[in-house]
Structure formats: structure tokens, C-alpha cells
Image (cartoon, rainbow, N blue to C red):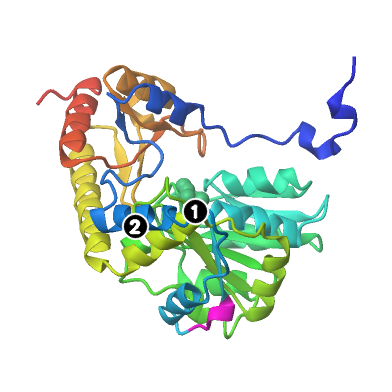
Amino acid sequence: MWDVSKYAVPWLKSAKVYGLADVDDAIRNPQRARMFVNECPLAPSEKVVEAVTRAARHGNRYPGTSPELRARIGRLYGAGAAQVLLVGGSSEIIDMAMRVFLQPGDEIVIPNPTFSMYEIRATVVGGKPVIVDTKPDLSYNTDAMLAAVTNKTKLIIVCNPNNPTGNFIDERELTRIVETGIPIFLDEAYLEFYPERESKVSWIARYPNIFVTHTFSKAFGLAGIRFGYMVGTEEMIKLFTKVQIPWSASVMSLSAAEAILDNQEELKRKRDLNRASIEYFCKALAEVPGLKPYHSHGNYMLVDASATGKASKDIVDHACKMGFMIKAMPPLHGRQGFFRITPGTEEENRALVKELKSFFGLHV
Ligand SMILES: Cc1ncc(COP(=O)(O)O)c(C=O)c1O
């Protein structure tokens, strides 16, 4: 029988797929609260919907490179349009970065835990992920990351704030990583939730090895519309443009991005709801003996239930039975009870807390 794997590049054998079975499951079960993939619980505003609808009327035309939108995004950071690349979601930049920097056998340093897409896309090009555990308190272990660098290291990942830990890397520690001169992928997917923190785009002039990504899937709440961007030096952007598939941001996603940038009130509403939800979960879950919620700067919260003796899968399966989709996390530092919650509506948050309290034996 003809065997496709004889022809496929050999490193795909061990490559994993970024599975979407849980999202399919959520779509099949709309009665369940979707609190597992760091989406926004609020639908896009009418302004965004109208902009998308207007753009769809020109859906017979290809988009260009949107110089005005790039200039506008650049101005947010004091950067020029030539320093900005627009894409249909920042996952594309993760994939492009692997194709720009990694040949088969080249190494990429990735903290653990973090967003799983980096490792997956690195293995798709034959790259070798070098996974470096965070410290027991889940902060970045910079010494270990620097010790993991070899002459084969072509890329280092820093997700800031990190998903799922919710914490920022210390600035002095980040400086040590950046000063290696190795390309640094600085993922700021969740930074709009926390505008008190300045973007590290301002570091690019001093450290041209940095590039920074943002997405409209999180605080802007447009995950299904698909829009993201990166900022880097002009040389960096030229390289990424070589590997980009043209037109990946559709006319609909470009128009949605423009519309929501014009409507800062929408961003604020989503951000305020999320911040209130994070505070609520933090306080409510800390009342449960044995539960340790990690305060988060993103729209997710990591919780360690190891001290309760419950395993993450049992917790998440129980929540699912009760109508809440939350995410089981792999063991960390020998602890088996991690799970992650993405805040839903206020009503969903209250109902989930009630359910979790009862599951952990705290009756309210
Ligand atoms: C850290 C991080 N970066 C990037 C992404 C991907 O976002 P996008 O929807 O822009 O592809 C995610 C999604 O969860 C994420 O957690």
C-alpha cells in the first residue's frame, strides 16, 4: 500500500497537532460555559460587526498591505509602518518565526509552562525545543534559560505576561536574556489587559534582536475574527515578510481591527470586566482550603489544587459534567492538580465558583 509517510519530512513523525477537539466539543454543546481557551465572554460591538459586514461587500477583492493601519499601530509605540506586519492572528507569527530562524536540528529555548503553540510549531520545521522549567513559584528561571543556550540556539521565547502563570518576567532578568543577542520572541498577547505595563517594543531600538507580537483575540475579544501583528526592526519585518503567506489577514479582519481601534471604550469595557473577574476568582478560590489561585495579568487564572489531593483531570471532568469547560494543565514540579480558568460572564463566574467550592467540600 502507498505510504505517505515515506515522502513526508521525517520530523513530522514526532510533531504534535495543536488540537481543537475541545473547541469542537464546546461548539457541539453550546449550553456549556466556555471558560477554557482564553476567549472574551463578550461578543464584538455593533460597530465591529458593521465594519466586518461592510468589508464583506468587497470580499471579491484581495487586501493589500494596509499601510495606514500599520502606520496607526506603529504610532502606538513610536514605530514606523515599515516596522509593523499584520497577520490573521499572532499564531501565524509563531509559525513564521520558526521558519525564519530554525533549520532542522536548531534549538529554541522555551519556558515551561507556557503557550503550547511555540513547541508545536518548532517541531513542525524540525527544530529542537529545549524546555526550561520555571522556578517552583512559577516565575521565569532566567539562570536555567541562559544555561540552556548553546551554539545551536536560534530563538528564545518570552511570553509576557506568561500564559498560564499570569506573571511578568522581571525586567533585569529579561535584560539578561535579551543581551545574549539571540533573537527573542516577546509575546505580549495579553498586555492590553494591563496597560500600566509598557510594551517592550520600546526596547527594539536598543536591542534589534527583539520582536514583539500582539493579538486582537484576547483583550480586544476578536478571537474568531483573527487579527494580530508584530513589531520589529525594518530588517526583521523584511525577513518575516518573506515567509508570510500574502493576504492572511482578510479584509474583514483588517476592518474589524480598524473599527475596534476607533472604539477604545469597547476595549476598556472588556478589560474592566476581565480584571474584576480575575479579582473575584482570586478571592473566592483562596477561601477554599488547599486551593492556590495564581493572580493573573491575563484573561486566565492558573489554580493549583494539588494540596486538596484532587487530580486536575478529575476536577475538569467534574466541572464539565456540571456545565463548565475549564482546562486541565499538565503536572508541574511534581504537583498534579493544576487547572486553568478563563473568566466568563459574571453569572458564569459565580456559578463556577459555587460548583468548585462544593466539589472541594466547602459548602456555601
Ligand atoms: C501567549 C499566546 N500567544 C498567542 C496566542 C495566539 O493568539 P491568536 O489568536 O492571535 O493566534 C495565544 C492564544 O491563546 C497565547 O496564549
Dividing the image into 4 quarters, which one contains the N terminus? top right
Of 106 and 231, the residue lying toward us: 231
Q: Is residue 188 left or right of residue 180?
A: left
Q: At which x and y percent is residue 228? A: 49, 60
The amino acid at mark 1 is: Gly
Rendering quarter of residue 224: top left
Residue 220 — which label? 2
Of 64 and 351, the residue lying toward us: 64
Secondary structure, magenta segment, majority class: helix
Q: At which x and y percent is residue 13? A: 78, 32
**Sequence-wise first label, 1 or 2:** 1
Residue 290 vertical position relative to residue 47 in the rendered view, above or below: above
Whether residue 264 is visible: yes
Rendering quarter of residue 176: bottom right
Give the SS element for disc 1.
loop
- Which residue corresponds to the image point at 60% horizontal and 58% vertical from the top-left? 247
Q: At which x and y percent is residue 222? A: 38, 51
Residue 59 — which label? 1
Residue 40 vertical position relative to residue 77 in the rendered view, above or below: above
Rendering quarter of residue 196: bottom left
- Which residue corresponds to the image point at 43% horizontal and 49% vertical from the top-left? 225
Q: Nearer the viewer, mark 1 or mark 2?
A: 1
Give the SS element for disc 2.
loop
Residue 330 vertical position relative to residue 252 in the rendered view, above or below: above
The amino acid at mark 2 is: Phe
- Which residue corresponds to the image point at 43% horizontal and 52% vertical from the top-left? 56
* The residue stretch that appears in magenta: 79-83
Report how far apart the C-alphas of labels 1 and 2 lie in the structure. Answer: 23 Å
Dividing the image into 4 quarters, which one contains the C terminus? top left
Residue 229 vertical position relative to residue 73 in the rendered view, above or below: above
Q: Residues within 10 Å of mark 2 (few under 14, many from 20)?
A: many
